[in-house]
Amino acid sequence: MILLGADHGGVGLKDAIKKYLEQNAIACKDFGTFDTESIDYVPIASKV
């Protein structure tokens, strides 16, 4: 399983990678963030 996470600056790329993985039946889990609102990367990185 591939774990994904990004701060607000990387959410677009994370979503593109997630879409690719899902289209190719590769298991992944998305820990966020899910929008472009400013957020610190540390809480997300610690989950990943």
Image (cartoon, helix red, strand yellow):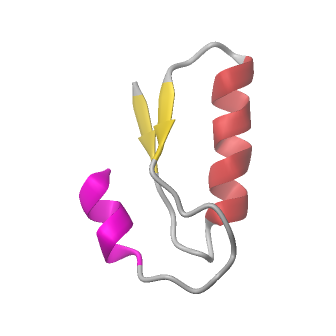
Residue at the (47%, 55%) spot, across then down = 5
Q: In this view, does 4 lie above or below 18?
A: below
Helix, strand or loop: magenta stretch:
helix
Percent coordinates x, y for residue 8 in the rendering: 60, 75
Measured as percent of width and height from the top left, residue 28 is found at: 50, 30
Q: Which residue sits furthest top? A: 25
Q: What stretch is highlighted in magenta?
A: 41-48
- Residue 31, x across and y down, in percent: 45, 51
- Asked if the magenta segment contains residue 43, the reply would be yes
Q: Quick one: quadrant of the N terminus?
A: top left
Position of 31 relative to 9 (above/below): above
Is residue 3 one of those drawn in magenta? no
Q: In this view, does 33 lie above or below 14?
A: below
Residue at image location 47% in from the left, 36% down from the top: 29
Q: Which residue lies furthest to the bottom in this view?
A: 38
Quick one: which residue is furthest to the left in this view?
A: 46
For residue 36, side relative to residue 29 (left or right): right
Left or right: residue 19 versus residue 31 is right
- Classify residue 18 by image quadrant: top right
Relative image position of residue 43 (x, y in whole percent): 31, 70
**Number of dots carrying numbers:** 0
> In the image, what residue occupies the spot 28% across and 54% down?
47
Q: Residue 45 appears in which quarter of the rendering?
A: bottom left
